[in-house]
Image (cartoon, rainbow, N blue to C red):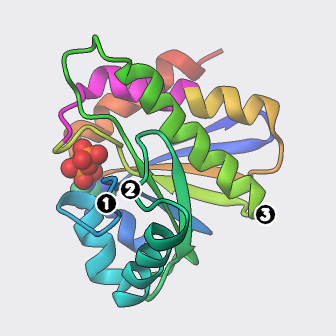
Amino acid sequence: MEFQVGKAILQLIKGDITDVETDAIVNAANSSLMGGGGVDGAIHRKGGPKILEECKRIRATEWPDGLPTGKAVITSGGNLKAKHVIHTVGPVWLGGFHVEAELLKQAYKNSLRLAVAKGLKTIAFPSISTGAYGYPIEDASGIAVRTVKEFLEKEDKLEKVVFVLFSERDFEIYLETAKSILAR
Ligand code: ADP
């Protein structure tokens, strides 16, 4: 399913983000940047050790105490089809009273900014924070779609943003959200 937003295409697909051939795929990492479960584990498994080596270098230089929630960094894509991986840390859901919404927005926005800063044209996101981190997907999908929409309306350098949903249910929820936010 595709939507036109500004000059760009916003696409929703059901699938595995490690198979996607955008310039960058986004990893829902944890602040250690040392890998983990869910999409993070899948990216490191398929991308190979080069990604982890670069993450270790980032920890040793830029972020010795770990990548703060809402920030983003970039590595190569290792053996993935995507040339780069943008690692961001979404918030853990703590009931909605702990600025989770703002932090989730920052995770999307900082990933998009980094892609533009690196001259990339296409980027794919998983559903950040809605797995192990427990963010309710109905709310998270609204933040994801609105943040991308606002970004694409101001910034014309990206050509395509893809949301890659891992289950049929997640796909349906994102689709309903996108229709209600993007329909003219
Ligand atoms: P978080 O800790 O940010 O919640 P998770 O990886 O646990 O991150 O989950 C985020 C979302 O990514 C979930 O909806 C999960 O189903 C999904 N996911 C897991 N593996 C993949 C994959 N290979 N491709 C795309 N999405 C995935």
- How many labels sit on residues? 3
Q: Is the residue 63 above or below the residue 99 in the image?
A: below
**Figure quadrant of the C terminus:** top right
Q: As shown in the figure, which amino acid type bears the numbered disc 3? A: Gly
Dot 2 corresponds to which residue? Answer: 66
Element type where label 3 sits in the image: loop
The residue at the far top in this view is: 97
Whether label 3 touches label 2, CB < 8 Å? no
Whether label 1 touches label 2, CB < 8 Å? yes
- Alpha-carbon distance for marks 3 and 1? 26 Å
Between residue 19 and residue 25, name the one nearer to us.
25
Answer yes or no: is residue 92 visible: yes
Residue 16 placement (x, y as % from top left): 31, 64
Label 3 CB less than 8 angstroms from ligand 1: no
Check residue 142 for magenta coloring.
Answer: yes
Answer with the quarter of the image where residue 104 lies: top left
- Alpha-carbon distance for marks 3 and 2? 26 Å
Dot 3 corresponds to which residue? Answer: 119
Q: As shown in the figure, which amino acid type bears the numbered disc 2? A: Gly
Answer with the quarter of the image where residue 122 lies: bottom right
Q: Is the residue 31 above or below the residue 184 in the image?
A: below
Between residue 97 and residue 122, name the one nearer to us.
97
Residue 41 placement (x, y as % from top left): 23, 69
Disc number placed over residue 32 in the picture, else none: 1
Element type where label 1 sits in the image: loop
Label 1 CB less than 8 angstroms from ligand 1: no
**Residue stretch in magenta:** 133-146
